[in-house]
Image (tube, helix red, strand yellow):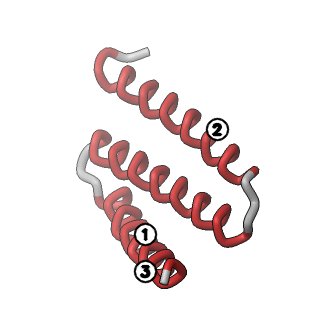
Amino acid sequence: MADIIFNIAAVITFIAFVITFFRILAGPELGDRVVALDAMTIMVLSIIAFLAHFLGRIIYLDVALVYGLISFLGVVAVARYMERGL
């Protein structure tokens, strides 16, 4: 039963990933693109967590943690640039 739920969650995550990718391409402003890119990184983090579960490799969760921290710093830097420049 848990595998079915994980598979459904993976499909939903993939569909959201594709929709968000189109939002990055069609975003009218930089802020829309930044929010979409941040959403994509969250989805990639969940995909890495799915892989960690399915492959039984806990080390992937450390990779996801580092990726999330780098993504957060990138969003903060872009937000600061959008607000008042570097």
Image location of residue 60, percent across then percent down: 71, 53
Q: Which residue is mark 3?
A: 8
Image location of residue 17, percent across then percent down: 42, 66
Q: Of the numbered discs in the image, which one, if any, rests on residue 13?
A: 1
The residues bearing labels 3 and 2 have C-alpha atoms spaced at a distance of 26 Å
Q: Which residue is mark 2?
A: 66
What's the residue type where badge 2 is placed?
Val
Mark 1 neighbour class, 10 Å CA radius: few under 14, some 14 to 19, many 20 or more: some
Residue drawn 73% across the image and 70% down it: 55
Callout 1 secondary element = helix
Mark 3 neighbour class, 10 Å CA radius: few under 14, some 14 to 19, many 20 or more: few
Image location of residue 86, percent across then percent down: 44, 15
27 and 49: which is toward the camera:
49
Image location of residue 81, percent across then percent down: 38, 22
What's the residue type where badge 3 is placed?
Ile
The residues bearing labels 1 and 2 have C-alpha atoms spaced at a distance of 20 Å
N-terminal of the pair, mark 1 or mark 2, is: 1
Callout 3 secondary element = helix
Mark 2 neighbour class, 10 Å CA radius: few under 14, some 14 to 19, many 20 or more: few
Foreground mark, 1 or 3, reads: 3
Foreground mark, 3 or 2, reads: 3
Callout 2 secondary element = helix
Say above or below: 82 vs 63.
Answer: above
N-terminal of the pair, mark 1 or mark 3, is: 3
Say above or below: 74 vs 11.
Answer: above
Say above or below: 71 vs 49.
Answer: above
Residue drawn 43% across the image and 80% down it: 8
Residue drawn 46% across the image and 51% down it: 42
Residue drawn 50% across the image and 78% down it: 2
**Most extreme residue toward the front, as rendered?**
1
10 and 3: which is toward the camera:
3
Q: How many marks?
A: 3
